[in-house]
Amino acid sequence: MNISLLKEVTKTTNKMALSLSVDNMANVKIVNFVWFEDQPNTLFFSSVKGTVGTAEYDKAQSVAFISIPNSDMIGNPYIRSQNVSIQHSDKTMKELLTKYLETVPNYQKVWDLIGSKLQVFELQLDDVYIDPGLDREKITLKF
């Protein structure tokens, strides 16, 4: 599987709009995420333990997302998927911290304030639609 376009686009963003449906009520949250080339069908994000948000993640019947391009990106490259499952991750924030610090500006401040309270979730993708920007071929990767 050629993940080069996915790799290219994930370098242009660190945020997503994460859409959930719980008890037939839709909700959208903006979260930072990280992605690893050796797990191309998985996105990791965190939430503060014990909050309404983490309870919603546990109960979500339907999950979708779209990445939010960095404001300086020409052509608005993004990835999105409607075929997503959400679950608690076996990874810890300490394991993911280096990647967060590399890809999310000012994440050290977040870590210093609430790092010990963060719980890791992962999004498992069945497929992902990749739009690398204006005038470029768009593809869907199936995992």
Image (cartoon, rainbow, N blue to C red):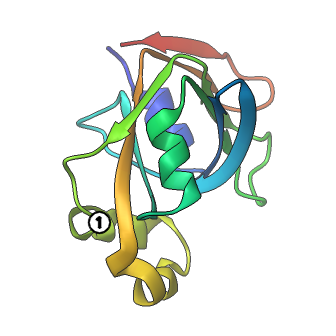
Q: Who's the residue at 67% across and 16% down the image?
A: 137
For the point 79% across and 23% down, the residue is: 135
Mark 1 surroundings within 10 Å by alpha-carbon count, few (fewer than 14), some (14 through 19), many (20 or more): many
Q: From the viewer's perspective, is 123 left or right of 72?
A: left
Kindly identify which residue carries mark 1. Answer: 93
Residue 102 appears in which quarter of the rendering? bottom left
Identified by mark 1, the residue type is Met
Q: Secondary structure at mark 1?
A: helix
The N terminus is located in which quarter? top left
Q: Is residue 142 left or right of residue 18?
A: left
Q: Quadrant of residue 18?
A: top right
Rendered view: 74 above or below 14: above
Q: Residue at x 80, y 30 (%)?
A: 134
* Badge count: 1
- The answer to whether residue 102 shows anywhere in this view is yes
Q: Toward the viewer: 50 or 107?
A: 50
Q: Position of residue 90 (x, y in %)?
A: 19, 47
Q: Quadrant of the C terminus?
A: top left
Residue 14 appearing in the image: no
Where in the figure is residue 50, as x and y percent of width and height?
Answer: 44, 63
Q: Quadrant of residue 94?
A: bottom left
Residue 19 to residue 34: above or below: above
Residue ID at (23%, 36%): 38
Residue situated in front as seen by the camera: 94 or 50: 50
Residue in the foreground of this view, choosing between 97 and 47? 47
* Residue 7: percent from left, percent from top: 44, 38
Q: Position of residue 27 (x, y in %)?
A: 73, 40
